Image: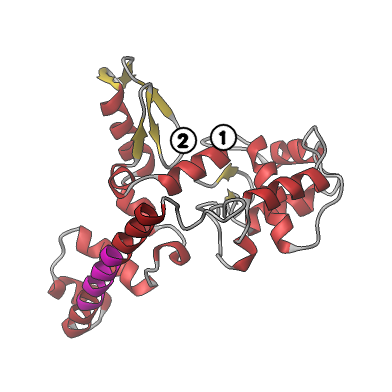
Amino acid sequence: MESKANEQFWNASKEEIKKGYIQDSEKFQCLICGETFTLGRIYQVGLVFYEAKKTVEIHIKEKHNSMLEYLLNMNSTFTGISEAQNQLIKLFSLGISDKEISNQLGIATSTIRNHRFKLREKEKQAKLFLSIMELLSENTDKKINKLDKGIICDAHKTATTLDSRFNITDDEKAEVINIYMDENGAIKKYPSKEKKKIIVLGEIIKNFKPSRDYSEKDINLVLKRIYEDYATIRRALIEYGFLDRTKDCSSYWVKE
């Protein structure tokens, strides 16, 4: 489920990402958590009834606040936005004037102007780059992640970093799962190489449901069935951005 939702997120169009959901002939699906809303069904939200499209829009607003906020909270490795730019974009979205932002952050308005200029240049570069990649795909009838044999898999969208360890093909993934995990999804041997760990952890996280809170005891019960050193797996799931938790470790959840 988690792997499928991740794939749908990265394959979504710019317009779909802005809306926060995708649609097929049967349903609307939230791109963040994967929750689905069936076409033709009526849903009750509070005391009011809505069709599926309106319900998914309400769902995104109530559960995820907004797509802008979600995207800005993603790892900067994915967005390419610096911490300072991220902070300014959030303030720009509130309609606050540059003078007010200057007073609030204690920076000169000329600095804000420079950031506006850099963001505009980044916007233009992004448009041109996307156009180039789309033309390349059209001309070759082949997306950039498609190799002569196999496909480069997308990193999970909650990854805490992004480097060569995530340069994984679908064939590599299948091979590692076959070597290190049995038919019941238990680990035969925990890999030492980081890339292989990421593949195994990506399979393990499928045992947990998104949008649900787990206690540490709940997490341990599931992981014990997978590997005897469940504490190592639990820490790794957090380290690589598959799971998140409260500071007091009282609650865990699948990162969306």
- Provide residue 243's location: percent of width, then percent of height: 60, 49
Horizontal arrangement in the rendering, residue 158 relative to residue 54 (left or right): right
The image quadrant where one finds the N terminus is: top right
Vertical order, 81 against 179 (above or below): below
Q: Does the magenta stretch mainly form a helix, a strand or a loop? A: helix
- Quarter of image, res 193: bottom right
Q: Nearer the viewer, residue 120 or 244?
A: 120
Q: Residue at x 37, y 55 (%)?
A: 71
- Provide residue 251's location: percent of width, then percent of height: 60, 43
Vertical order, 210 against 17 (above or below): above
- Quarter of image, res 224: top right
Q: CA distance from mark 1 to mark 2?
A: 8 Å
**Residue type marked 1:** Met
Task: Write down the residue under mark 1.
Answer: 1
Q: Which mark, residue 34?
A: 2
Q: Secondary structure at mark 2?
A: loop
Q: Residue at x 31, y 43 (%)?
A: 16
- Provide residue 85's location: percent of width, then percent of height: 31, 71
Q: Farthest residue toward the top?
A: 41
Asked if disc 1 and disc 2 are in contact, CB closer than 8 Å, the reply is yes
Q: Nearer the viewer, residue 177 or 94?
A: 177
Magenta part of the chain: 117-128
Mark 1 vs mark 2: which is more N-terminal?
1
In the rendered structure, does residue 118 fall within the stretch colored magenta?
Answer: yes
